[in-house]
Amino acid sequence: MEGLNGVHHLAISTADMRGQLEFFTDVLGGELKALYWMHGVPDTVHGFVKLNDSCYVAFVQGTANAGIEPVLGVSHAGSAAGPSAPGTMQHVAFNVKDLDELVAMRDRIRSRGINVFGPLDHGMCHSIYFAGPEQLSLEVATSEVPIDERAWIDPEVVELVGIDPPLL
């Protein structure tokens, strides 16, 4: 068994399927590939936007979603540095192939009137940050080389979170 080899799709709850699909296709350049009644879930639709042939961002809109109010610091972080409840998505970072593509994506997003912060050099990657519909905290990043655990696993943090060496 080879195990996991990537993210097939990330499913994000929405009360505005149309707004999410327009943002992820027009602003970010994805391609709508599926929009259907969600299998086995009454009154719920599912939409998939292609990032590449094996990676998608998906949205789930059920009738109950509209009655659930997003709360910054609870359900939504509000920024890539903000808090959110355990088990919620703090932010999502999408990948581009290089720094030129990152700058081009920044310019594309800005051309749609959206504020973008960055690019920032984090050492392991360069990133831009911006807000998506329904208070999503979004990032686009690129790394020149794969992340090197010898440089990015901090022994102090390993001890703080209680990870045993076999996990490393």
Image (cartoon, grey):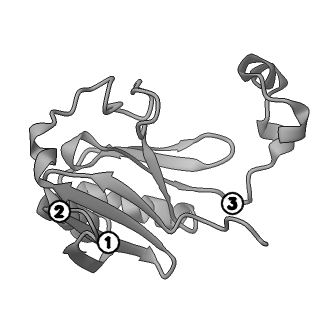
**Which comes sooner in the sequence, label 1 or label 3?**
1
Which one is nearer the viewer's eye here, 110 or 155?
Answer: 155
Q: How far across and how far down the image is residue 9, in percent? A: 45, 65
Query: Quarter-wise, where is residue 37 in the image?
Result: bottom left
Circle 3 residue: 144
Q: Is residue 12 above or below residue 18?
A: above
Residue at (77% x, 38% y) in the render: 152
Q: Nearer the viewer, mark 1 or mark 3?
A: 1
Residue 88, x across and y down, in percent: 41, 37
Q: Is residue 55 left or right of residue 65?
A: right
For the residues carrying marks 3 and 2, which lies nearer the camera in this image?
Answer: 2
Number of numbered tags placed on the structure image: 3
Type of the residue with mark 2: Pro
Q: Quadrant of residue 163?
A: top right
Mark 2 neighbour class, 10 Å CA radius: few under 14, some 14 to 19, many 20 or more: few
Between marks 3 and 2, how big is the CA–CA gap?
44 Å
Helix, strand or loop status at disc 3: loop
Q: Which residue is under mark 2?
A: 42
The residue under label 3 is which amino acid type? Glu
Is 97 located above or below residue 85 in the figure?
A: below
- At horizontal 51% and vertical 48% (from top left) the residue drawn is 127
Mark 1 or 2: the one toward you: 2
Q: Secondary structure at mark 2?
A: loop
Say which mark, if any, is on residue 35. Answer: none
* Residue 144, position as x, y percentages in the image: 69, 60
Between discs 3 and 2, the one toward the N terminus? 2
Q: Which residue is mark 1?
A: 48
**Residue 114 position in % (x across, y down):** 22, 49
Q: CA distance from mark 1 to mark 3?
A: 28 Å
Q: Are marks 1 and 3 in contact (CB under 8 Å)?
A: no
Is any atom of residue 168 visible in this view? no
For badge 1, the amino acid type reads Phe
